[in-house]
Image (cartoon, rainbow, N blue to C red):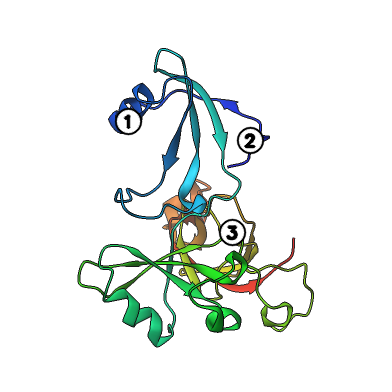
């Protein structure tokens, strides 16, 4: 996390794990993770939502720093290279990296900008559909939906799916499962509900009720946008 990020004042959490960690880190900070990693696992910066300040007495002060590199876990369904599945069999319950084809020849020393992200491996050694994007990944300029503009940076692959209420990982046009029109969602924003039509009874129409409502849904990334 970057030290120059301004903190905000929030109500301290009541999570027993964070409170216990605070007692062990008096005068410091404790990380706010969105996934419970094993002690031996590598925890990427993208898994850290932020950090809570701890007083000299071991209590959470309420000061909170958000992590700009945080990327929420998304639901993603797409074909993967054989090496991902082969490697997953050796690390059940862990996370495995997906490498951009431009960097496969550099294995095992892959630059951060050529790692797309990490896939969660199930207890049976199979790759799940849970994917965490790498905030430092830099795709080839001509690989982003056929666009040669290097300013457009893809953080997750097209067809990535994410649910209402989660944090949007990539700015682009997202289509809801409800079948309504695509919506521009920006990275870092909460994924919204979708507007759907509903049939009204004659009585409801007479009362002036709206003929649509907003419902939670799953959104799919169809096109990248630079802003």
Q: Furthest-bottom residue in view?
A: 82
Q: Is residue 94 above or below residue 149?
A: above
Q: Residue at x 46, y 51 (%)?
A: 47
Q: Nearer the viewer, mark 2 or mark 1?
A: 2
> Where residue 212 sits in the image (x, y, percent)?
51, 57
Question: Which residue carries the number 2 mark?
Answer: 3
Q: Residue at x 77, y 72 (%)?
A: 150
Disc with the residue nearer the chain's start (3 vs 1): 1
> Where residue 8 sits in the image (x, y, percent)?
59, 27
Question: Which residue carries the number 1 mark?
Answer: 15
Q: Are marks 3 and 1 in contact (CB under 8 Å)?
A: no
Q: Nearer the viewer, mark 3 or mark 1?
A: 3
Q: Is residue 103 left or right of residue 4?
A: left
Q: Secondary structure at mark 3?
A: loop
Question: Which residue carries the number 3 mark?
Answer: 135
Quadrant of the image occupied by residue 180: bottom right
Q: Are marks 2 and 1 in contact (CB under 8 Å)?
A: no
Q: Is residue 83 above or below residue 173?
A: below
> Where residue 40 sits in the image (x, y, percent)?
31, 52
Q: Residue at x 56, y 75 (%)?
A: 158
Where's the C terminus, which quadrant?
bottom right
Disc with the residue nearer the chain's start (2 vs 1): 2
The alpha-carbon separation of the residues under discs 3 and 1 comes to 27 Å
Q: Residue at x 65, y 62 (%)?
A: 171
User: Is residue 62 visible in this depiction of the protein?
Assistant: yes
Q: Secondary structure at mark 1?
A: loop
User: Is residue 220 visible in this depiction of the protein?
Assistant: no
Q: Is residue 48 above or below residue 194?
A: above
Q: Is residue 108 left or right of residue 21?
A: right
- Crowding around mark 1 (Cα neighbors within 10 Å: few <14, some 14 to 19, many 20+) is few
């Amino acid at each position: 996390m970057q030290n120059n990020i301004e903190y905000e004042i929030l109500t301290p959490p009541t999570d027993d794990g964070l409170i216990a960690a605070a007692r062990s880190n008096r005068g410091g900070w404790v990380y706010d993770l969105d996934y419970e990693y094993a002690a031996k696992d590598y925890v990427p910066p993208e898994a850290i939502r932020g950090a809570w300040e701890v007083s000299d007495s071991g209590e959470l002060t309420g000061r909170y720093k958000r992590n700009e590199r945080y990327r929420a876990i998304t639901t993603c369904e797409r074909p993967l290279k054989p090496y991902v599945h082969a490697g997953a069999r050796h690390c059940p319950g862990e996370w495995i990296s997906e490498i951009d084809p431009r960097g496969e020849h550099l294995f095992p020393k892959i630059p951060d900008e050529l790692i797309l992200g990490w896939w969660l491996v199930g207890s049976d050694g199979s790759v799940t559909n849970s994917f965490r994007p790498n905030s430092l990944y830099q795709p080839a300029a001509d690989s982003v939906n056929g666009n040669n503009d290097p300013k457009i940076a893809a953080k997750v692959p097209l067809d990535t799916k994410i649910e209402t209420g989660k944090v949007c990982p990539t700015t682009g046009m997202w289509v809801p499962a409800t079948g309504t029109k695509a919506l521009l969602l920006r990275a870092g924003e909460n994924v919204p509900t979708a507007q759907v039509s509903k049939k009204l009874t004659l009585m409801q129409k007479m009362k002036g009720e709206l003929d649509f409502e907003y419902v939670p849904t799953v959104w799919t990334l169809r096109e990248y946008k630079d802003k």
